Image: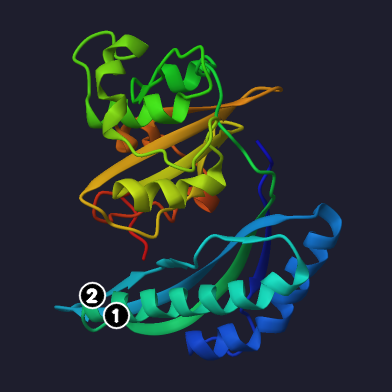
């Protein structure tokens, strides 16, 4: 899995009391960082997160919080893609900020703390045959890793989630009778990450995909949909191939996550992500 690189812009001394003004003032700075990385690496997967210090009076005390507001995960294959991605990210962060204020009641901005660009080289990934789980993940008992010998691990993982087996959940034969319930028209196996939005629309199933690297779980694909049926998948890799698994318990998987860089954006969204620290 490609390592995630971060670039943090400290808001000290900048226009830090109005989040939108701050984001607009840093537009060119962020654009130049992303532009440089695309030239170095080719395609780039990236997202922005803004940390804001806020406070409110609660009874006789002052309550403070430092929520993170995350932009949409973007894939930029060429320089011309950057502006569209940046505008979407800024809009998403600011909308989430407004929603946080509306839902939290009486929160006021003390200051914008920083803005971080999270970046990783983009290489189209696709699932394949069985790969054993790393020991750390296996011990959590939070993942169903179907032992397929074909290139259809994506399909088997989805079926494992939709039709959970009480025993021998890693066995392919448990799910064979349900294969016709999914629509894979125009989608080839092994399924690539780029094919997932098409699968979501064809099947009305929202899907999040997470990766695992250096002991940490992080997002690769976060669904734009909120269908009634939702599945969280883990994509693991060895030196030769990648493999999809079903995350049956995301809370348990993330329970001891230490890195704030990846941990802070896991949030309580409908049928999505859940961690104690809430972010919008």
Residue 138 lies, with reference to residue 98, above or below; the image says: above
Looking at the rendering, in which quadrant would you find the N terminus? Answer: top right
Q: Residue 101, labelled with which disc?
A: 1
Residue at x 34% of width, y 32% of height: 158
Q: Is residue 275 visible?
A: no
User: Which of the 4 quarters of the picture holds residue 31?
Assistant: bottom right
Look at mark 2 in the image and give the residue it sits on: 104
User: Which of the 4 quarters of the picture holds residue 109?
Assistant: bottom left
For residue 272, side relative to residue 193 (left or right) = left
- Secondary structure of the residue carrying tag 2 is helix
Q: Is residue 169 visible?
A: yes
Looking at the rendering, in which quadrant would you find the C terminus? Answer: bottom left
Give the total number of marks visible in the rendering.
2
Give the residue furthest to the left.
59
Compute the Cα span from label 1 to label 2. Answer: 5 Å
- From the top left corner, tell me how far across and down residue 100 is, in percent: 30, 74
Q: Nearer the viewer, residue 185 or 16?
A: 185
- From the top left corner, tell me how far across and down residue 79 is, in percent: 77, 70
For mark 2, does the 10 Å Cα neighbourhood hold few (<14), some (14 to 19), or many (20 or more) residues?
A: few
For residue 239, side relative to residue 50 (left or right) = right
For residue 39, side relative to residue 18 (left or right) = right
The reply to whether dot 1 and dot 2 touch (C-beta < 8 Å) is yes
- From the top left corner, tell me how far across and down residue 189 is, in percent: 53, 31
Residue at x 38% of width, y 24% of height: 156
- Secondary structure of the residue carrying tag 1 is helix
């Amino acid at each position: 899995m490609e390592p995630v690189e971060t670039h943090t812009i400290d808001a000290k001394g900048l226009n830090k009391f109005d989040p939108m003004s701050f984001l607009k003032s840093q537009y060119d700075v962020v654009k130049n960082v992303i532009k440089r990385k695309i030239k170095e690496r080719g395609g780039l997967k990236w997202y922005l997160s803004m940390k804001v210090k806020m406070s409110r009076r609660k009874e006789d005390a002052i309550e403070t919080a430092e929520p993170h507001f995350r932009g949409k995960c973007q894939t930029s294959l060429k320089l011309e893609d950057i502006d569209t991605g940046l505008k979407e990210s800024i809009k998403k962060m600011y909308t989430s900020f407004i929603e946080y204020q509306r839902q939290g009641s009486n929160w006021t901005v003390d200051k914008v703390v920083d803005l971080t660009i999270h970046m990783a080289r983009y290489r189209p990934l696709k699932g394949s045959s069985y790969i054993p789980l790393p020991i750390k993940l296996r011990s959590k008992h939070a993942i169903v890793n179907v032992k397929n010998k074909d290139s259809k691990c994506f399909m088997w993982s989805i079926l494992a989630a939709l039709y959970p087996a009480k025993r021998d959940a890693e066995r392919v034969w448990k799910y064979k009778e349900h294969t016709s319930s999914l629509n894979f028209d125009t989608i080839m196996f092994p399924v690539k990450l780029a094919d997932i939005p098409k699968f979501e629309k064809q099947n009305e199933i929202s899907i999040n995909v997470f990766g695992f690297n250096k002991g940490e779980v992080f997002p690769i694909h976060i669904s734009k949909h909120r269908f009634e049926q939702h599945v969280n998948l883990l994509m693991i890799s060895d030196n030769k191939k990648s493999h999809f698994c079903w995350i049956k318990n995301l809370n348990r998987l993330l329970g001891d996550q230490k890195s704030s860089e990846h941990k802070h954006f896991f949030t309580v969204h409908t049928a999505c992500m859940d961690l104690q620290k809430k972010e919008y």
